[in-house]
Image: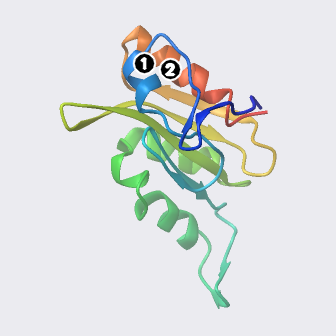
């Protein structure tokens, strides 16, 4: 995992061909996170049933994670269903990398890692601009082993 370097106490150094993404990135990290250019959430495995001292039916918590959080709100259906299959046994962490242009959020890509060791499982580039792809590729270095 790439180590953070800081331009100042509120902004990590990020360098890619995507200058807007670079300028807007304040911090990238693993786990549940909301930052200027990253949203991320844990996805529990299908078999996980315990949460806050309550027992749920199998699949309930995974479905909640895939439908009721900030990343899930912007996930395309086909990616959500692929994540459901890829996290069925071991769970994972889903990351959304994006930038802002004219007050509008531009999704650049989604990344899925294993939750225990942060190994890369899958990448979906949703912005096909080569700069956006390069920014997502650089961001992956900060969240994966």
x%, y% of residue 19? Answer: 41, 16
Q: Report the side of 66 relative to 91 (left or right).
A: left
Report the Cα–Cα distance between label 2 and label 1.
5 Å
- The picture quadrant where one finds residue 88 is bottom right
Who is closer to the viewer here, 144 or 17?
Answer: 17
Query: Which residue corresponds to the image point at 40% horizontal and 34% vertical from the top-left?
Result: 98
Q: Are marks 2 and 1 in contact (CB under 8 Å)?
A: yes
Q: Report the side of 19 relative to 29 (left or right).
A: left
x%, y% of residue 57? Answer: 59, 79
User: Secondary structure beneath disc 2?
Assistant: helix
Q: Quadrant of the N terminus?
A: top right
Query: Which residue corresponds to the image point at 58% horizontal and 56% vertical from the top-left?
Result: 32
Q: Quadrant of the C terminus?
A: top right
Total marks placed: 2
User: Secondary structure beneath disc 1?
Assistant: helix
x%, y% of residue 4? Answer: 69, 33
| Residue of label 1 | 132
Q: How busy is the neighbourhood of tag 1: few (under 14 within 10 Å), some, or many (20 plus)? A: many
- The picture quadrant where one finds residue 46 is bottom right
Does 81 sit above or below residue 105? below
x%, y% of residue 80? Answer: 45, 46
Tell me the number on the disc at residue 135.
Answer: 2
Coloration mode = rainbow
Who is closer to the viewer here, 128 or 135?
Answer: 135
Query: Which residue corresponds to the image point at 66% horizontal and 50% vertical from the top-left?
Result: 92
């Amino acid at each position: 995992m790439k180590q953070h370097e800081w331009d100042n106490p509120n902004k990590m150094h990020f360098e890619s061909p995507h200058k807007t993404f670079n300028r807007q990135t304040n911090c990238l990290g693993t786990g549940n996170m909301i930052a200027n250019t990253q949203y991320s959430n844990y996805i529990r495995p299908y078999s996980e049933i315990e949460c806050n001292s309550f027992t749920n039916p199998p699949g309930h918590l995974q479905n909640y994670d895939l439908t009721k959080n900030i990343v899930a709100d912007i996930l395309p259906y086909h990616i959500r269903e692929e994540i459901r299959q890829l996290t069925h046994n071991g769970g994972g962490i889903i990351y959304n990398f994006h930038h802002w242009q004219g007050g509008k959020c531009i999704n650049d890509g989604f990344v899925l890692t294993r939750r225990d060791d942060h190994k890369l499982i899958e990448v979906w580039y949703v912005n096909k601009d080569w700069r956006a792809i390069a920014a997502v590729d650089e961001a992956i270095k900060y969240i994966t082993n």
